[in-house]
């Protein structure tokens, strides 16, 4: 299987990352010099993103939805409130909309404008999510993009593409794999990858996850 990152990572704005890094550094210096921000605060935020915030949080939400039908209903009705029940609140979970994948419907999340993403639930977005090819092609030819990620959907499956915004962050609840009836929430969460919560992967089957 080809690596979708190879196909999606090219970007004609190659100068942007280093330029953006420089601009960010310059902005930080100005704010620190003006006494508007404490460098320790910036370090703490970066530390949180690197060590605490990540897709394991979203995976807990999905595992709970798989295990608890009442929670699942609440999550689909009001993602923000359901995440808050588990203690996950913050800027990026202000408007969480959960989308459930099934045998009939496959949801795929993109931000066509930039890289809006449910950070508090998934951590930082992968490079391909921010790349122009993914942002453009997910809308125009989602089935082709999904095939490059290894998901080949039959025509009977409806594909729904959701464009994230600064106000709405989507979380895909992947379909619960077969053979997981006896698993507890922790074991279920281990089957839920970052990509499965964006819609570019399925949840792992327990046999595959165990290497069997
Ligand atoms: Fe965006």
Image (tube, helix red, strand yellow):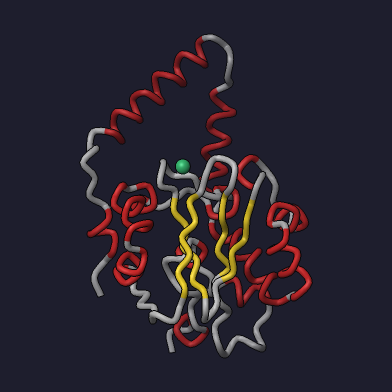
Please, is residue 84 above or below residue 3 in the view? above
Task: Identify the residue at horizontal 59%, vertical 69% (top origin).
Answer: 100
Please, is residue 82 above or below residue 207 in the view? above
**Of 160 and 85, which appears nearest the observer?**
160
Residue 96 in the image: x percent, y percent? 63, 52
**Of 89 and 141, which appears nearest the observer?**
141
Q: Is residue 85 left or right of residue 139?
A: right
**Of 127 and 53, which appears nearest the observer?**
127
Residue 4 in the image: x percent, y percent? 28, 63
Residue 147 in the image: x percent, y percent? 32, 72
Q: Quadrant of the N terminus?
A: bottom left
Task: Identify the residue at horizontal 48%, vertical 61% (top origin).
Answer: 198
Return the residue found at the far top: 34
Q: Quadrant of the C terminus?
A: bottom left
Task: Identify the residue at horizontal 68%, vertical 64% (top origin).
Answer: 76
Number of marks drawn: 0
Q: Is residue 89 left or right of residue 165?
A: right
Residue 184 in the image: x percent, y percent? 68, 79
């Amino acid at each position: 299987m080809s690596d979708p990152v190879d196909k999606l990572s090219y970007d004609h704005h190659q100068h942007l990352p280093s330029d953006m890094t420089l601009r960010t550094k310059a902005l930080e210096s100005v704010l620190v010099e003006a006494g508007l921000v404490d460098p320790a605060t910036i370090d703490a935020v970066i530390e949180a993103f690197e060590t605490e915030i990540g897709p394991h949080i979203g995976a807990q939400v999905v595992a709970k939805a798989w295990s608890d039908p009442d929670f699942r209903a609440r999550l689909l009705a009001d993602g923000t409130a359901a995440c808050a029940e588990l203690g996950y609140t913050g800027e990026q979970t202000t408007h969480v909309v959960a989308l459930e994948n099934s045998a009939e419907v496959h949801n795929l999340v993109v931000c066509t404008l930039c890289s809006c993403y449910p950070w508090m639930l998934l951590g930082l977005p992968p490079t391909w999510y921010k790349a122009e090819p993914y942002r453009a092609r997910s809308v125009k030819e989602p089935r082709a993009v999904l095939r490059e990620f290894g998901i080949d959907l039959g025509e009977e499956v409806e594909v729904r593409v959701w464009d994230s915004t600064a106000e709405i962050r989507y979380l895909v609840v992947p379909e619960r794999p077969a053979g997981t009836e006896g698993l507890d929430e922790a074991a279920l969460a281990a089957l839920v990858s970052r990509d499965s919560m964006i819609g570019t992967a399925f949840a792992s089957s327990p046999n595959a996850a165990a290497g069997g």
